[in-house]
Amino acid sequence: MGWLGLDDTDSLEQGCTTYTFHLLLEGLPDSVQISTPKLVRLWPFAQQRTRGNAAVAVELKTEDEEQLLAYLETFWKQNIVPLAGRLSESNHDVRQQYPSDPGMVWFSSDRPDETFYAASVRQEVQLSDVPSATRAWGGQGRIGATAAVSWRERQPTWEAIVWRRVERHGQNERLVCDSTLERIDQLPSTFLSRDPRKGTSLVAPRGPCPVLFGVRARDFTTAQYAGLELRNAEQTEDSIGMRVFVTNQATDDHLSEPVQTTVLSSEILNRGSTCIVTENGQWMAFEESGPIKRLAQWFKPGDVIEGNGLSPEAGVLHLEKLRLISSVPSRERPMCIKCRVRMKSMGSGQGCRCPKCKDRTDDVWNEVARIPPFTSWVQPPHGSRRHLAKPLEW
Ligand SMILES: [Zn+2]
């Protein structure tokens, strides 16, 4: 018994670590027993991450480890080494591209404990920090491969991934039956299949990679059922294989405990992105974060708020969850009861006066409670959430 991990085989033409892994599993010697493969999302800001920043792993049982290792050696040389050094293509990503640097690891009998996974999902990890494997191949990808091996499943989710025919790889458009997808989306256990506001599909990736679609569910049986239904639907294009992965998607594993703080100031930036300066550093609410951005824009200095997210750099939090704890009242000049107009300040310490009838009052301000746009936790809309983000409804 042992654990196999693989990462960073994405590239322009062949893209997608899940597909390489599928081919590897398909070719395993008959004597090897395969458990449910794992798809593990990692630290989204990793400097040399691949597009989806996902790594894969599987538990394998065999009486003949030598035969298995010989197979892995051959597969590595023939199918993965040629992928190294390629750049992955992305239209919606301007960050610096790193050539893919695949890694594969085999842990015989014992695997690293969960601490390595926990670090890899919450912060940048260096190659020198990777626990040593029984056998290891390649470079940078060993980080994700080892993290995937060391992941322990706690309230995981499942994703049925279907790959399209080889001659369709490299093309951007995909044919996935929309009416079947609509039906699958209604199943209580599936999630993030369609955007409920726009009615658009969330199961098919964009771009040239081999994945036709991936259907997510909160249990294995539903993921498998939904995957097969969608794969076999008449209006879905032909495919070459399907596997159900157990995943850390929608687990919030990337987040620590939420932080409570007080707003010091805030500034609305480009396209509504909002920077809140708090007693605990800068909290960023980005344009695409929807309700988070709207709530952030409403905050005033003195409001007490609670938030959670990731810090790509010290002192900056990218908000993924946000709520108001208590708000400071707004202040208004008193009204003149007779004229129903707002009074004006007479200057420091001299009260207010009605501009019409000249009546006076010693009151300087009236305090009025502000009405927030949301009174409980908010999250980004479906299409803008991280794979790792657990929906608030759960
Ligand atoms: Zn008046």
Image (tube, rainbow, N blue to C red):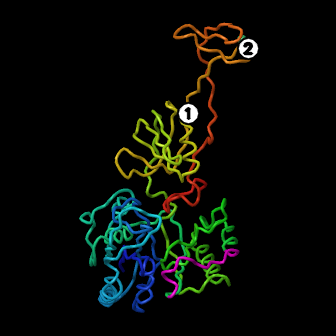
Q: Is residue 171 magenta?
A: yes
- Percent position of residue 350, x then y: 56, 7
- Percent position of residue 28, x then y: 40, 89
Q: Amino acid at mark 2?
A: Ile
For the view shown, which residue lies furthest in the right direction? 338
Element carrying mark 1: strand
Q: Is mark 2 within 8 Å of ligand 1?
A: yes
Q: Which mark is residue 337?
A: 2
Q: Which residue occupies the foreground of this view, 117 or 333? A: 333
Image quadrant where residue 75 sits: bottom left
In the shown orientation, is residue 216 left or right of residue 20? right
Q: Which residue occupies the foreground of this view, 11 or 353? A: 353
Badge 1 local density, few (<14 within 10 Å), some, or many (20+)?
Answer: some
Which quadrant of the figure contains the N terminus?
Answer: bottom left
For the view shown, which residue lies furthest in the bottom direction? 30
**Residue visible at 58% across and 66% down in the picture:** 218
Q: Main secondary structure of the magenta part?
A: loop
Q: CA distance from mark 2 to mark 1?
A: 31 Å
Q: Amino acid at mark 1?
A: Ser
In the shown orientation, is residue 154 left or right of residue 189? left
Q: Is residue 125 above or below residue 168?
A: above
Image quadrant where residue 55 sits: bottom left
Q: Which mark is residue 326?
A: 1
Q: Which residues, given as a range, are shown in magenta?
A: 167-180
Element carrying mark 2: loop
Q: Is residue 22 above or below residue 373?
A: below
Q: Which mark is residue 158?
A: none
Q: How many marks?
A: 2
